[in-house]
Amino acid sequence: MTGTVRTFRVPAQISYGCGAIETVGVEAKRLGGSRAFVVADPNLQKAGIPDRLMASLQGQGIEARLFVDVEPEPSVQSVTAAAAAAKEYRGDVLVGIGGGSALDTAKAAVVLTKNPGSLEDYFGIGLVKQRGVPAILVPTTSGTGAEITPNSLFYVPALKEKKAVVSPHTIPDVAIIDPLLTLSVPPGVTAATGMDALSHAVEAYTSQNASPMTDLYALEAVRLIGTHLRTAVANGNDLAAREGMAKASFYAGIAIGNAGTNIVHALAYPLQGQHRITHGVANSLLLPYGMEFNALSNLRKFGAIAEALGEPVVGLSPRAAAAKSAEACRLLSLDVGIPQRMSEVGIRPEHIGVLVEEAMKQTRLWANNPRQVRSEDARAILEKAL
């Protein structure tokens, strides 16, 4: 008799701690690098963060070229330009630093250093044939977990859709998490990325592909976010809060990288593709509604989420405790300034039909959902969120 077998993947090395960015050069050299192509979020330049990274590389005798033409919510065209620049430079190590957009751009560029064709050839699951050049990813926000996951997302303008490349070959050789890099992130971005991390943790914890290993990371991420996100938004200089959120983000990234996401991401993708609402805001807005719908699927786990978010559940029935999870999530999102209704970000009743149609195409994500979702269910959830 055999049981369910789960695969658990993480980067070969994860370096965490204040000042960890200073180790980039050492790690690049250890990976055999002599020419580094660096993909960086252009918004980091005012804070001098790319300069510190370049100095670390050059201090180890590594030549480096900085590429900052990174598009928010990157389109296929912008990623193609980054990949072309990386191949032209012929670097032997690639470093990505920034939020999810910069890291996903870097991951795509890595893929195309060794795999033929275009980015579109790799949309889907497991289509990348081999690893690219060694890669180091350094997040500067606490939310996407892109430095950990095998997933990267790109906007296809002709289709008005987000498409994903999902492959273990996009997991970097080294992930470097330095909480100090998040101190300058503005409150709105801190809130949206933090709630995005919460959506990752909740969905991974309740996924059909959850395992005891992913549960450890997912539930601890929920607890850390419930403890630290409000403070990180209210006072971005609070280092303890920033450290807590940095841990939460990469814990949640480990969880989704192995257990996957489900209802919230499936419903949110069309908001991003059709209406260009940012990934973090779309997920954050829909998270309480997705939790309300899914709570019946696993009362024990949703009750544990409520407790991890600080809700008093002792003495409550399993159903009442589970219901507290969405309430706690909604209060947290309200406290940190997340829109509570889709109408607040420009969605109107006449948009619902297309949103439902596009959401139901996300079969990869629906397969992970703990409760069966029909198109009429998706419509009801979106109408409630309107």
Image (spheres, helix red, strand yellow):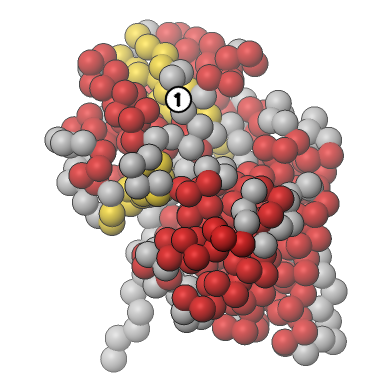
| Vertical side of 243 occupied by 135: above or below | above
Which one is in front, 110 or 161? 161
- In the picture of the structure, the residue carrying the numbered disc 1 is 70
Can residue 284 be seen at all in this image of the molecule?
Answer: yes
At 67% from the left and 37% from the top, the residue drawn is 189
Which one is in front, 194 or 349? 349
**Screen quadrant of the C terminus:** bottom right
**Residue at the limit of the structure toward the left, as seen here:** 116
x and y, in percent, of residue 310 in the image: 81, 65
Q: Amino acid at mark 1?
A: Val
At 60% from the left and 67% from the top, the residue drawn is 382
| Vertical side of 286 occupied by 344: above or below | above
At 67% from the left and 70% from the top, the residue drawn is 384
At 78% from the left and 47% from the top, the residue drawn is 337
Dot 1 crowding, Cα within 10 Å, few <14, some 14–19, many 20+: many
Left of 291 or right of it: where is 237?
A: right
Can residue 212 be seen at all in this image of the molecule?
Answer: no
Label 1 residue SS: loop
| Vertical side of 215 occupied by 53: above or below | above
x and y, in percent, of residue 380 in the image: 60, 75
The image shows a total of numbered marks equal to 1
**Screen quadrant of the N terminus:** bottom left
x and y, in percent, of residue 18 in the image: 65, 30
